[in-house]
Amino acid sequence: MKAKIHSLLSLFCIILIVPLIAQADVNNPSSKVAGKDIPRLQNPISVEYLKKNLRKSMPRLVLNSTIERNLKRKLKTDPVVKNMYKAIQLNAVEVQKQPLLERIKIGRRLLSVSREMLYRMNILGMVYRIEKDPVILSRINEEVVAVCNFSDWNPSHYLDVAEMSVAVAIALDWTAGKLPKSTIGLAKTSLIEKGIKPSYNKHGNTGWWINGTNNWNQVCNAGMIAASIAIAEKDPELAAKTISRSLEGMPEALAEYGPDGVYPEGSTYWGYGTGFTVLTAAMLESAFGTDFGLANYPAFKESAVFRVLCNAPSGWYYNYSDCGDKRSENGDITLAWFATKTGNKAFFEKERFLRPAKEMGKLPRNAGAGLVWISQYEEKGGQKMPAAWKGDGATPIVIFTGGEDGPHQYYFGGKGGSGSVNHGNMDGGSFVFELNGVRWVVDPGNQSYYELEKNGFDLWSRCQSCERWTLLTKNNYGHSTITVNNQLHLVDGKATIVDFKPGNNPEVTINMTPTFKGQLKSAERRFVKDSPTSLLIDDQFELSENTKLITWQLMTTADVEIVEGGAILKKGGETLKLENLSHPELTVSVISLYPAPLRLDRQIEGLKRIEIRIPAWTLKNNKGEIKVRLSGE
């Protein structure tokens, strides 16, 4: 039992730290939320519509007879499809060596179990679709019976229910009536009683996500749609009501991609929320022949550009918010869906999909669906990723690169936003910077939720004085930004992009005044790529009567040598020069953050904060400027 718990805990932590311009149907009405018009999805769902338009034969979730014929044809002719299927086969061998799942919670979550079940059904289900192996069918049956005999799927944390619902629905659908009748009956009853019905419990606080604005909306509604399609013949009234409810609620989360495709919660949460949204689109399309406008929702397809640009040359993400550190070496399955929909080869990571199958290791839990999307891809041209790009929205960001063939592997990512965004941090004005394959300026990233929660830490409240902001990964003291009077940023003070100039020497200006309300009268931060190997950071501010101290901060894991007028950073055989252009007479300070200040902080080897501290009394006319250049060779 201890070994099983340890295995599930490891899986849970890995997953957590592991994620085209189009218009919606203009005939759809909009709802006004927080002063914004939210385009709606088409929603003709009724019992009559369901009975008339839902595909009668299975499979009908992601796969259908037409899609499956194409997949089997591509398995004979397409080296990418063949290689990915080989990896799925190897994963299926490993799955069959594992014990059946048990209802073991980690803290308040059953999520690691649900995710493992979804992974197993994607792997085993796809092998069964291709090979019709009775041994695989028998194992799917055992897996389904095991989880359907759980007392519940943990509705107090509905992500757990949602992912389990998708898993069981796919198991039923991809076996297409070949499971024992008793198992089919058990599974459909479980999808109704343990999957869908708890979401209608008005007294259990289980359905807040239906119209939510974050990844819960996307994941949980995906689970309810999958379950509803699976039980449609058994209870068409419940199925129709639930699918209609989801189509009504999903736009509240989809609107967060606007206007430019930025996912407010960061790149790995893009993988999570978007992964389930494209799965939903694929399920609806295969089952009904339409996704009701989901794929063409404004800014949704554009988010693929955001995802690609958040992958830095070093292999790290631009890891703002509660984002993981590094991407997988394997191809991005969710991006493959966007490649299929657009024909854009920039979204199809062919070389990564062609990695030796035995080196791919454990595949993502949507790997079966991903194989379908890969098989549907047909190149229709390329779209070069912009070398300078900005996206507005709840979390405005900007990215400068050296271009696809840049010799210096230049990468800069900067952001506005506020701590009040879901999974957000007090990091307005912060940035990351890479040159020559080295990440010189780092973001501390995310840390295990479970380790914090089991200690009673209040991770999720986001008031100004809430406990979340004591952590270095969450507060402004752990980010490369400005701090005033050694105080926290204002949690609701949103920093916004007010000027952006692309070109060979792109620049961006971020208005940080709301971030420092009560601390400064005004503040602006400007970033300039002033050469192929340098970055200029220019802060200008006006003091208020409360201003005592301005602290300029840079987070790094490099070795730091203090020199006249700045510092020299060294890492990986490379060097980077930090020049204090505005105050060369000041000596920078280096604060070691390894070990980190709190026991519950994330411990990052070699982490340190470079500071330039300027007392307010030294500034004339209540105005000041801090100008720093980072330059390499």
Image (cartoon, rainbow, N blue to C red):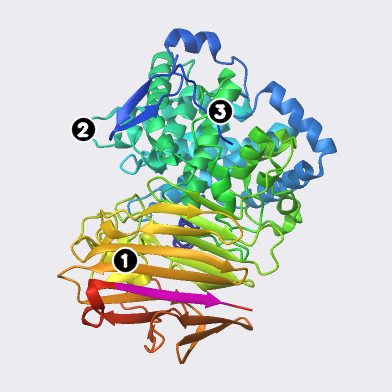
The x and y percentages for residue 242 are 39, 23
Q: Is residue 278 above or below residue 502?
A: above
Q: Is residue 289 magenta?
A: no
Mark 1–mark 2 distance (CA, rounded to whole Å): 35 Å
Q: Kindly report which numbered mark, 1 or 2, lies closer to the viewer in this rendering.
A: 1
| Secondary structure character of the magenta stretch overall | strand
Side of 378 where 271 appears, left or right: left
Q: Foreground residue, 165 or 548?
A: 548
Marks 3 and 2, how far apart at CA = 30 Å
Q: Secondary structure at mark 3?
A: helix
Circle 2 residue: 203
According to the image, label 3 marks what residue?
283
Q: CA distance from mark 1 to mark 3?
A: 40 Å
Question: What residue type is disc 3 on?
Answer: Met
Upstream in sequence: badge 1 or badge 2: 2
SS under mark 1: loop
The boundaries of the magenta stretch are 624-631
Q: Within 10 angstroms of label 2, few (less than 14), some, or many (20 or more) residues?
A: few
Count of residue discs: 3
